[in-house]
Structures are given as structure tokens and as C-alpha cells.
Amino acid sequence: MLRDDGFRVLDRQECLRLLAKMPVGRVVYTRQALPAVLPVNFSLDTDSSVLLCTDANSELVRAIEGVVVAFEVDDFDAGNGSGWSVVVTGRAAVVSSLAEHARLSQDGPRSWMPAQEPVFVRIDSELITGRELGRPQRSEAPPEQPPDH
């Protein structure tokens, strides 16, 4: 239930459930000492890590390999002022195991961009936070009655 201020913290399981519903998220990382955000398609692995598929020679792989990044997914309805946001924070690493790469080639995400040498990047879900936003709850107090005269 939303609090009176229209905000609710989501637990880890609710965050994972919401993540699994969405096909696109945003990787937040540092590029040349500046913040960068890149929308990407993704999937969740069985261990709740975020999986991306991209080209081995991409700028993204060079920028995030072995470093801590954030991954954000959200869904908002501007018409009714409600929605949610989930952020996964963890270390990103290129999947190097041949067996794991073979498994992900069957079950993992497909890159929406052309990839000459596709690789999978795993973002460990070391920290998952989420929030739900909505219109503040108003108490339904009865309307004041005018005094009897």
C-alpha cells in the first residue's frame, strides 16, 4: 500500500518481478570521467543478475568490464501520476565461460544492435532498490456540515 505521501519502498522480490516484465532498461556508467546512460534490452538470469548482449568490441564493454554500474528500469503513467522504478547496482563482467556463453546463446537476451562478435555481460544484483509512486492517499473524512441555526 502506498504511504500518505504516495511513495512505497519495494522489496527485493517485488523488484525482481517488475524487472522481469520489462524488455528495456538503462545502464548507468562512467564514460571518459563523465556520467553516461545507455538504453539496452536485457533479461534476468536464474541468479537474478541482469544480462546484456552486445559486441565484444563495443564502447560499452570497454567502459563497464569489471566495474560497478547501475541498471535502471521503470514504468510510469503520466496521466495518473503513478509508476515504479527499480535500480540494480553491481559489478559488470563479460561472461568468459564457454559453457555459460553456450547456455546464454540459447536462453539469454539477443542484441537489438548488430554484433559481429556477440558477448554477454552480467551485472551482479548486489543491491536492488525500488520504489512505487502514486498519488498521495487522502483520508476520506466526511465533509463538514454547516452549523444548524
Image (spheres, rainbow, N blue to C red):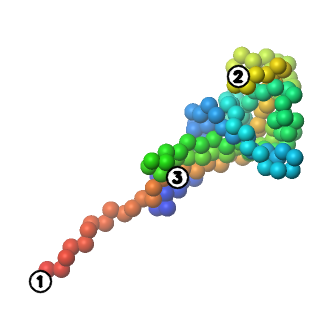
Label 3, secondary structure: give it: strand
Residue 38 in view here: yes
Name the disc covering residue 110, or none. 2
Q: Residue at x 49, y 61 (%)?
A: 5
Residue 120 point in image, percent of width and height: 79, 27
Vertical placement of 48 versus 83: above or below?
A: above
* Three-letter code for the amino acid on which mark 1 is drawn: His
Q: CA distance from mark 2 to mark 3?
A: 31 Å
* Three-letter code for the amino acid on which mark 3 is drawn: Leu
Residue 11 point in image, percent of width and height: 60, 47
Q: Where is mark 1, residue-wise?
A: 149
Q: Quadrant of the C terminus?
A: bottom left
Q: Residue at x 46, y 61 (%)?
A: 4
The answer to whether 4 appears left or right of 139 in the picture is right
Lower sequence index among marks 2 and 3? 2
Q: Dot 2: few (<14), some (14–19), or many (≥20) neighbours within 10 Å?
A: many
Q: CA distance from mark 1 to mark 3?
A: 45 Å
